[in-house]
Amino acid sequence: MKAPYRISRSRGTLRTLQDRKNVMRAGAASDAACIFCAPDREILAESALSLAFADAHPVSPGHALVVPRRHVVTIFDLNDEEYADCFLLARRVQELLAARLQPDGFNMGVNCSEAGGQSVWHAHIHVIPRFNGDTPHPRGGVRNVIPRKADY
């Protein structure tokens, strides 16, 4: 199944976490080299404080990202208003993708820090449509991030 919107490769370069922290210390609202501060993809939904667009490397058709407009490294760096806004927009994106794609379920996730799997140093929420049969054993969902701990 093909995603119903354009997905293109992002411009910009990934830098180290220390570089991102230095940008944050300087109080910058955005980072010119950040691929999420100036995405080159179609905006799926937006609000005053956040926006959503297709993931450049989708794990499933419709895989989308919700990002705050202000450049911060992790979701925990957001103020309360931004945090709430991002999650409200994630719900709107889920509703939009559900209507467009009719998936059988969703995963929603946030990777924070290198140890947590973060690879782009701008806070973001993954909204991932799931389809029956897209993986042989979906039981446990995000618990499988540490495979040996997935059984319960």
Image: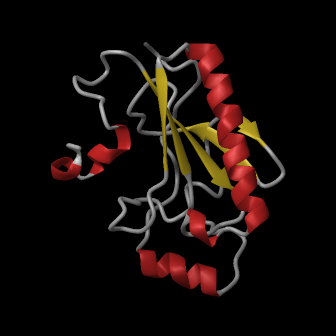
Q: Is the residue 54 above or below the residue 144 in the image?
A: above
Indicate the position of residue 90 as horizontal and vertical percent values: 65, 41
- Which of the 4 image quarters holds residue 32? bottom right
Indicate the position of residue 70 as horizontal and vertical percent values: 71, 64
Indicate the position of residue 16 as horizontal and vertical percent values: 41, 74
Residue in view at x 69 percent, y 51 percent: 86
Residue in view at x 48 percent, y 79 percent: 19
Question: Which residue lies most toward the right here?
Answer: 48
Question: Which residue lies most toward the left here?
Answer: 148
Residue 33 visible within the image: no
Query: Which of 152 and 92 lies nearest the eye of the viewer?
Result: 152
Q: Which of the image's four quarters has the C terminus?
A: top left
Residue in view at x 27 percent, y 24 percent: 135
Q: Is the residue 148 above or below the residue 100 in the image?
A: below
Question: Which residue lies most toward the front here?
Answer: 152
Q: Is the residue 17 above or below the residue 147 in the image?
A: below
Residue in view at x 49 percent, y 53 percent: 110
Indicate the position of residue 81 as horizontal and vertical percent values: 79, 62
- Which of the 4 image quarters holds residue 27? bottom right
